[in-house]
Image (spheres, grey):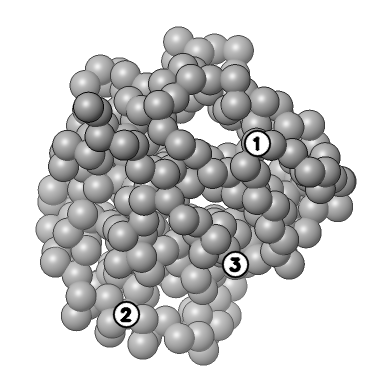
Amino acid sequence: MEDKKPLVSIIFPVKNEGEHIQNTLNSLFSTKTEYPLEVIVVDDNSEDGCCDFLRQANERNIKLVYANNAGVANTKNIGADYAKGEYLIFCDAHLFFEDYWIDRLLEPLKLGMADCVNPGIAVYGDAKTAGFGYTWNENLEPKWNVGRKDVFAAPLLAGGCMAMPKKVFDDIEGFERGFKIWGREDEEVSFKLWLFGYKCCAVPSVTVIHVFRTGAVPFTFTWDDVNYNFMRMAYSHLNEERIEKCKKLIKYSNPDKIVEEVLKSDVMQQRERYLKKRKYDDDWYMKQFNIPF
């Protein structure tokens, strides 16, 4: 008799997604899987009524949760707080799925090959071209990994569809809780996973289709938000020399003001806690993945 499959929690952070969230959920529930699912939709104070349809009673096991402009990272954390599954899958609200994508994506986690995984992320309308997580260039700018066929260790995973065991998520303290609206949350959580001794892998045999927006992002954020997150990540994980290099990379903001604001937060206490807990340092990581920073 086959072992009973554990519950999987699929978490969708949502902010002014229009019809995308309904299309994404329709796609999810039309695909096959052998896993029992719960779906958690976290509406981060949307103004377009995109989640109104979920207020009606339904049989699909969807939990609708509300946040108040929490930002992407913390909206995902809020969803995880409600999750009862052994595995968590964080998904953008503008995706299309294929049959048994969940089953095949979770396989490396079940086999102990990885602790967090990405499928291939393909562009809607061009499904043959997919990226498999990221790496960093010399300015810590993310670049897609492409042209891969087998499961491989990826320096950074894309938050558009990211799966990990709930116990791993809890051990790393989830997504960065001090981040502002948007920026660097995928990179920070991947970096933290590696430093804490976990393994991130991309699974090219699984593909999800991502609707990349052609117009403006449907929520408001500033370069100060993005740069704040960048420097908070730096102070949380990097040595002093690299922190200074990050400060020099800040664009469209006053670097001194950004650093001043970051240092007023709890980041130095977090840094001390992380340095004690992590298994590897940033020197190891940069060398491991040939990142010239």
> Would you call the spot at circle 3 few (<14 residues within 10 Å), some (14-19), or many (20 or more)?
many
The disc placed on residue 180 is: 3
Tell whether 165 sits left or right of 128. Answer: left
Residue located 35% across and 73% down the image: 236
Type of the residue with mark 1: Arg
The disc placed on residue 60 is: 1
Tell whether 280 sits left or right of 82. Answer: left
Q: Earlier in the sequence, mark 3 or mark 1?
A: 1
Type of the residue with mark 2: Arg
Look at the numbered discs 3 and 1 and tell me whether their residues touch, using CB distance below 8 Å: no
Q: Nearer the viewer, mark 3 or mark 1?
A: 1
> Would you call the spot at circle 2 few (<14 residues within 10 Å), some (14-19), or many (20 or more)?
some
Location of residue 228 by image quarter: bottom right
- The residue pinned by badge 2 equals 271
Residue nearest the observer in this picture, 42 or 7: 7
Question: Where is residue 176 shown, x and y percent of the image?
Answer: 45, 66
Q: What SS does tag 3 mark?
A: loop
Question: Where is residue 174 shown, x and y percent of the image?
Answer: 41, 63
Q: Nearer the viewer, mark 2 or mark 1?
A: 1
